[in-house]
Image: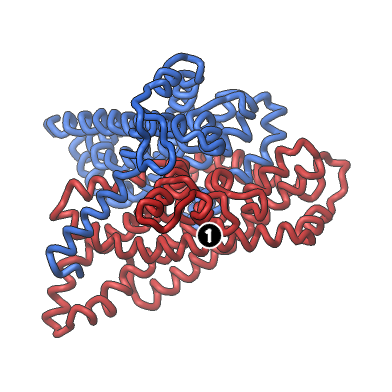
Chain colours: A red, B blue
Amino acid sequence: MWQNSKPYLFLLPAITMIFVLFVMGLGEGISQSLGVYSSTDKLHFAYYVQLWSDPNTWSSLKFTFKIAFLSTLSSGILGLILSVVLLRTSDQTPLLFKTLQLPLLLPHFIGAYFIVLLCMQSGFLARIAYLLGFISDPSQFPILVNDHWGLGIILTYIWKETPFIAWMLYPVLKRIQNTWWDAARLSGANRFQYMREIVLPLVFPTWLTSCFIVFAFTFSAFEIPYLLGVSYPQALPVLSYELFTSGDWEKRSLALALSLSIAFITGILGFFTYILGKRIRTQKGVGW
Amino acid sequence: MFKSHKSWALLQLFLFIIILFPFIMMLLFSFFTGWSWPHLFPQTLNVSAWSYLFSGNAGVQEAITNSLVIAFSATAVNLLLALPAAHALAQHTFAGKKIVEALLFAPLIIPPFVAMMGLQITLIQWNLTDTRLGVTIAHLVPTFPYLLRPLYTSFTTLASEWNAQARLLGASRLQRFWYVSLPHLMPGILAGVMLSLLVSFSQYLITLLIGGGAIKTLPLILFPYITSGDLRMGATFSILFTAVTLSILFIVEWCLKRFYKHRHTVPM
């Protein structure tokens, strides 16, 4: 009996914490988004209807999705390339290898600060453009920060997430590195075949998972769109925050309906990625 | 890939520049003023940003103290929760394991700020909003999965035979943990503690939601300088933040490595 209940006992403190602070928080959020603040209130979906019948919410959704998608795609591709570079620097240039860990240690808002410095209309890049004779005045430089396209936001995410993906892939590549190449060459495979048949299938599940983590994060993160965004269209988490802190109870419920919609989308995405990852693994018989 | 040595060297140089350039620029901007168009760099040496930072008016000391106390308390509590949890997940099979795993790692996928928005009313009733304790409690959720993951991996590679052997040799439960398990888990603990500290240091929204602006941490005092476009103060605070973060990480790494080394010399 003791042996059977032991793992549950060990898990109890952690589960209690997550349950009280996370699950109950979500539960209370759901009930508040349905207009239930006390036991006498009647449950209704009016806030969700109001929220999603507003075209403003839809343009925020499109904007947020675009940022998340473009950031994930760019850092996914760049991160894959960087992971190969990491593999080589690990033996050849330990100093660079160490340096490449730096972006992992720093939060996004430091990156945001630097993107402002670099990309604003009178920023470093604009001055270089001036020196090269492309523009004669700051106003001629394109608006890259606090722009309607969210370019500054995307650039900040690329700065931070490319190393993240590279460092997720690095241990996988490290394990493949030499032994498998020798075996493949012995069986008569060339470099290209080796890449396509061995490296890519082994790296793909980890790459997909990392990309998903990046997407879920960039879709639901508040800080960078708050710092580098514009007032219209706003990213969903920023919109939610503004509604939440407006001091109006109706808007507070709207904010919770919106936040839970965000949580629902990332939750669904997480579930599908998990299923997809599992299917890939069982199909190819790859355990790592 | 990158066959010629020349292109490889160029690529490396490019990476060095891309990573280190922001820090060089930040240093420049915190020590110099007068960035008039079209100068590439600010022109005049001026340390007023730094003297303001240390003048006591900027609330820097309070922010550093808050950031450190919150990050270390949340990490310590999470370590106590995560150690037994990681042990159970890695070394036991039991009914409902998949569900428990999904639950404990869920804050990585479902943004914790959503739960904090929902929990805010309850925390107000418990008098936990606008307090450091409340913010610390709120930081437990986003940091926990980052601490759990490396511990989980460490426990997975910890062979149960080692403990069995130690038991055979007459080691007590505590001795087995101290001499067998802990040295093996140390790298995982180290990685988890660092990640947890980093995640706590960089929280903004959750600190604001639960701390109500009354509990000022480093990100809270840094943000206004970025939104207002005050490049000089922004740079100075960013350097301060980077310096605090990196020195904490170095100290933690140094302490744990020392401990680790010392433990290896213990005759077993």
Choose top left, top right, bottom left or bottom right for residue A252: top right
| Secondary structure type for disc 1 | helix
Q: Residue furthest top?
A: B56
Q: Is residue A28 above or below residue A180?
A: above
Q: Is residue B38 above or below residue A208?
A: above
Residue B231 percent coordinates (x, y): 46, 35
Residue B85 percent coordinates (x, y): 44, 43
Give the residue at x 14% y 85%: A188
Left or right of A113 on screen, residue B110: right
Residue A186 percent coordinates (x, y): 11, 81
Give the residue at x 48% y 27%: B70
Residue annotated with mark 1: A68
Label 1 marks a residue whose chain is A
Give the residue at x 56% y 63%: A66
Q: Is residue B159 above or below residue B214?
A: below
- Comparing B119 with A236, the one in front is A236
Q: Is residue B188 above or below residue B109?
A: above
Image quadrant occupied by the C terminus of chain A: bottom left
- Comparing A30 with B1, the one in front is B1
